[in-house]
Image (cartoon, grey):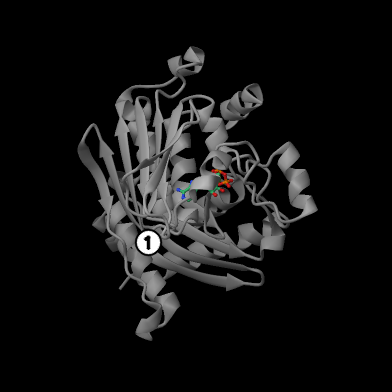
Amino acid sequence: DELISQIAAGEVIERPAAVVRELVDNALDAGSTHITLRLLAGGVRLISVEDNGVGIPAHELPVALKRHATSKITSLTELESVGTMGFRGEALAAIQSVSELSVLSRTANQDSAMLLDGRSGELQPAARAQGTTVEVKELFYSTPARRKFLKTDNTELAHCVEAVRRHALTRPEVGFAIWHEGKLVEQWRAQTIDAASGEDLNKQHQAALDRRLADVLGDDFLENSVAVHYQSGNVTVVGRAGIPDAARSRADHQFAYVNGRYVRDKVITHAARSAYEDVLHGHRQPIYALYVEIDPTRVDVNVHPTKIEVRFRDGREVHQAVRHAVENALAVPRA
Ligand code: ADP
Ligand code: MG
């Protein structure tokens, strides 16, 4: 089982940023409104993710570290896809197999927090407010070959920040802080969305998202981008598309989301690039954040263990929607 976990880990945990991606994903799943990431040595010596979510009940702590034990499987088809590709209920198990992992957690109705040492399996009371802290130390200590492939601390840190950025750009109502070697590297305040305020929720979300985009990508991104709003058939595309110039061209700042999850998708990338070529001729690396909403039955999210790739049932439909969405946005004269 340890070996299977290590193989699974090799597939999915390629560097510290992959651990960060999974731990932040879990923290968001737990309904957290604030998430703090602390790193040492680019994440190789320590990755700690601290949240204020629902916490893990003490009796479930050991279960959380077991493969598949906590899979959120609700149907037989899902169960089948787990066998081939699904990476469900095994992120913590996979991470634990290549690191020293501990989980400190407290739910709302516990008198104290509990600390689980992944290596020894020892469970003991500890101090903490409601929420969860997962600590990952000495990543790849048992797989020196993998450790050798890691880049400098600063490069690994940049990848870790990028992993949080991808989450942050789709969850503006959650606050994030990133520390490296005791120094605050990034901080993105939680943007309030108040369902009770009577104000239109979509508008509130859009405003919150704009503020988050400015926080994460820079105020100048907001000033030098246009809003995207497009709907056609099964597909809705919203977000912002940057007006590129030489200074703002960044190969790593194309953010695409499908139903709220960050994806790397050739259909979307190609469609967006085509729109830029049509309207602005020759600008190759624009900055954009595009949020595609599509009927979940028209997209398969289980084609990659980390769900970073998706397969659309009708790629042309999505391509056209994204291309038109960006073209329309860019063609509108700016106020
Ligand atoms: P998955 O997220 O696919 O269920 P993981 O291995 O990532 O699998 O996590 C295992 C389980 O541990 C989760 O299903 C969840 O119940 C629990 N868990 C992990 N991290 C947290 C967290 N930060 N807050 C609350 N529960 C968590
Ligand atoms: Mg998970």
Q: From this viewpoint, which residue is outermost toward the left?
A: 183
Q: Would residue 1 appear left or right of 135 to someone viewing this image?
A: right
Q: In the structure shown, which secondary structural element does the residue marked by tag 1 occupy? A: loop
Q: Is residue 164 above or below residue 107?
A: above
Badge 1 residue CB within 8 Å of ligand 1:
no
User: Residue 290 placed where, x, y %?
Assistant: 48, 58
Q: Is residue 211 above or below residue 113?
A: below
Q: Give the residue displayed 50% in from the left and 18% down from the top.
A: 146
Quarter of the figure that contains the C terminus: bottom left
Q: Give the residue displayed 62% in from the left and 61% down from the top.
A: 320
Q: Is residue 195 above or below residue 130?
A: below
Which of the pair 285/81 is nearer the observer? 81
Q: Is residue 251 visible?
A: no
Label 1 amino acid? Answer: Pro
User: Residue 238 placed where, x, y %?
Assistant: 48, 66
User: Residue 178 placed where, x, y %?
Assistant: 29, 43
Few, some or many C-alpha atoms within 10 Å of disc 1 (few <14, some 14-19, many ≥20)?
Answer: many
Q: Give the residue displayed 40% in from the left and 78% down from the top.
A: 195
Q: Give the residue displayed 71% in from the left and 60% down from the top.
A: 298
Q: Would residue 52 appear left or right of 321 to someone viewing this image?
A: left
Quarter of the figure that contains the N terminus: top right
Q: How many marks do you count on the picture?
A: 1
Q: Is residue 252 above or below residue 144?
A: below
User: Residue 197 placed where, x, y %?
Assistant: 35, 83
Which of the pair 145/97 is nearer the observer? 97
* Image quadrant in which you'd find residue 285: top left
Q: Is residue 89 visible?
A: yes
Which of the pair 288/197 is nearer the observer? 197
- Disc 1: which residue: 172
